[in-house]
Amino acid sequence: MRILESKFVQGFIKMANDGYLQGWHERNGGNLSYRLKAEEVEMIRPRLNAPGEWTPIGTEVPGLAGEFFLVTGSGKYFRNIIVDPEVCLAIIELDETGCNYRIRWGLVEGGRPTSELPTHLMNHEVKKKLTNGKHRVIYHAHTTNTIALTFVLPLDDKVFTRELWESATECPVVFPDGVGVVGWMVPGGREIAVKTAELMKKYDVVIWAHHGMFCSGEDFDLTFGLLHTVEKSAEILVKILSMTPHKLQTIQPDNFRALAKDFKVSLPEEFLYEKE
Ligand code: 2HA
Ligand code: ZN
């Protein structure tokens, strides 16, 4: 089967375009990666390019040795993915040490995988291990309202989680583990990747101050839906804070406990602190 026609490539392209239409991908902002299933690799193997040179990833991910990923290209615009996926995307293969990659499809006009490849792969490594291989998608977007909040809320996991939970009732059900926050760092390298992957051990959502958000999930719908839900809640909170610094009423800790019971999720008490 032609690689472009395969279901996972089509799902990837749709997700990327949906993100663009939401306004989260100005210029070359954001990146997306998908860890292929073994049967998907076998299905497309006859149509992969002959192996080329190995290139260092810039970090080590031994837990992903030999895996294949579909990724966005560095400097490529999300708005062009749907028009010319073979120019904007790549399928890469990792070597047996998890230190190097090589391109096996795509980027037909040249280029490299996303500048955030270290963060994507280190997140994939953590999630593959902790979810028994269920999580396959890592998504980074420049989510306007979530970014705005990083200028006015303390850069603290507990505060961000609680404020986002309070801003829309579905939130604690959609991300019961909460969200992590990374203070401002230089993007694109190993240091921010290590920090993000550490938080991904606990959360499926990590916010980068003054930059954007990373989400991890099982498939394209769940991962897009997670990021969309966080950003929608952030939008509501931005509107609230734009009207008044004081909420007249909100969802209270005991309301969250009742919600947890009915919706059969466990909400860590660390986020249900009493406010002054
Ligand atoms: O330009 O979003 O974080 C791609 C990015 C880098
Ligand atoms: Zn970014």
Image (tube, rainbow, N blue to C red):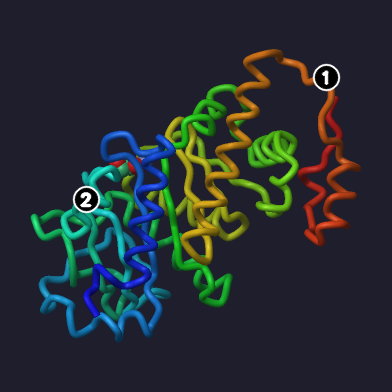
Mark 2: secondary structure: loop
- In the displayed structure, 86 sits above or below 211; it is below
Residue 118 spot, x, y in % from top left: 34, 56
Residue 271 spot, x, y in % from top left: 76, 43
Q: Is residue 127 left or right of residue 18?
A: right
The residue nearer to you, when weighing 127 against 198, is 127
Q: Which callout, 2 or 1, points to the residue nearer the camera?
A: 2
Residue 86 spot, x, y in % from top left: 18, 60
Disc number for residue 248: 1
Residue under the point 71% across and 15% down = 245
Residue 43 spot, x, y in % from top left: 29, 84
Disc number for residue 171: none
Q: Which residue is mark 2?
A: 83
Give, as a three-letter code, the residue at label 2: Val
The residue nearer to you, when weighing 158 against 75, is 75
- Ligand 1 placement by image quarter: top left
- In the displayed structure, 164 sits above or below 222; it is above
| Quadrant of res 50 | bottom left
